[in-house]
Image (cartoon, rainbow, N blue to C red):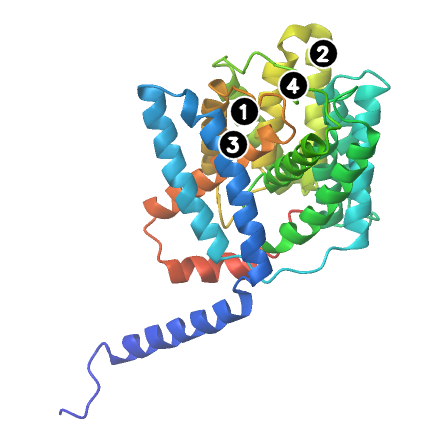
Amino acid sequence: MSGVPGPTAHLEASETATVRDLREGYRQYRPSLATLILGCALAVALGFLYVDGFWMRAHGVDLAFVALIGALGLLGFVLSLITSRPSRLPRAIDVTLGLFGAVFAQFLTREMRIPVLVAVGVTGSIIGVLSLRDGPLDFMASASGYAGMFTGLLQPGPVLDWGWVLIAGLLAGVLMSVVGPTVLPGVGARIGAVAFLAGSIVYLLAQWTGTDSPPLLPVESRGLASWAILPIGMAGALVTWVLIHRTSMPFVLASALPSLCVCGIMAIALPSGLSVLGSAWVGGTLIASAAPERLPTAFWIGTAGIVYGALMVHFGGPLTGHVGVLGATATIACMATAAAEWLMHGRRLGSLVARIAPASATPLR
């Protein structure tokens, strides 16, 4: 009977075939050198933000929380990077929309004197309507325009002139066009992370060329020290998630239109709280762009919203007012929450590659 296969032979053969298929799939989707470079650039930007805005100012229980989220965020980044795909060349439509978003948002805030968060809602709603079904914009074009909009909200006046706004918009459009479909696929709020990276590059260039007016970021918003941020951030994430997955509304419109309503009402009824509470809402909406393969249910979306709010409660320092801070923090919250979800379900790395790589190519239209 030694030649008769054992009862587990077929199972072992099936597992071997599965492993082989996973390896072949990973060869197809594995990140290119350019993808890894872009991923590492985002990691440097997010790491600097986390250390400067959170780690350096945390003590006691807050420090323990920051350390935990930082460790989970690092794991989430690694899991996201290894499931990235080969990068592509930027598209002209994406770059154009990035430029449009930056210029239009800056025009509303600088020339029309519209509050920043209301300008976010107006600009994003216009871009979102153009990305409706059968509209002229696809998901990546609208996402590039949204990223450009956040990047275009540079400090006005003598700090950075219109030339830097144009550069910021173009850079955001290029980065989002390349990052969007390939780097850290499925991670929520990458729009904000791209805006933060592009804004950081523009700020550094302006500083090196001596065209900024010191101090580089003179506007302080007195931090976001209000526990009301937690439920508001969670509500923003959940409302946007429901609009995307229950009404098939494209992400940019699902994020921007409620933000316009919420921040518009706050600007009229509670102007003193707009910068704090409105920021919590807008940042929370970006979390909903996470793919179901990363944050599969409303519970995990809401959890990421709470983590985002808890981080923003104690945010401060010289990066206050930096463009993209809200979205970059939301990205960290998404990666940390996705890592916690992965650990809690005890999934293997191979299953993650199989689950993320093909599925996250589908955009949140």
Residue for point 49% across, 25% down: 53
Mark with earlier residue (1, 3): 3
- Image coordinates of residue 193 in percent, x first then y, are 59, 38
Residue for point 48% across, 18% down: 313
Task: Evaluate whether residue 260 shows in this view.
Answer: yes
Task: Depth check: give the residue in front, 347 or 177.
Answer: 177
- Give the amino acid type for the residue marked by disc 2 in the picture: Ala
Task: Depth check: give the residue in front, 354 or 275.
Answer: 275
Mark with earlier residue (4, 1): 4
Residue for point 70% across, 38% down: 147
Residue receiving disc 1: 233
Q: Residues within 10 Å of mark 3 (few under 14, many from 20)?
A: some
Rounded to the nearest whole Å, what is the CA distance between mark 4 and mark 1?
Answer: 30 Å
Closer to viewer: mark 1 or mark 3: 3
Find residue 81 and name its label: none
Residue receiving disc 3: 49
Q: Secondary structure at mark 3?
A: helix
- Give the amino acid type for the residue marked by disc 1 in the picture: Gly
Whether tag 4 and tag 1 are in contact, CB under 8 A, the answer is no
- Give the amino acid type for the residue marked by disc 4 in the picture: Pro
Mark with earlier residue (1, 2): 1
Residue receiving disc 2: 267
Residue receiving disc 4: 215
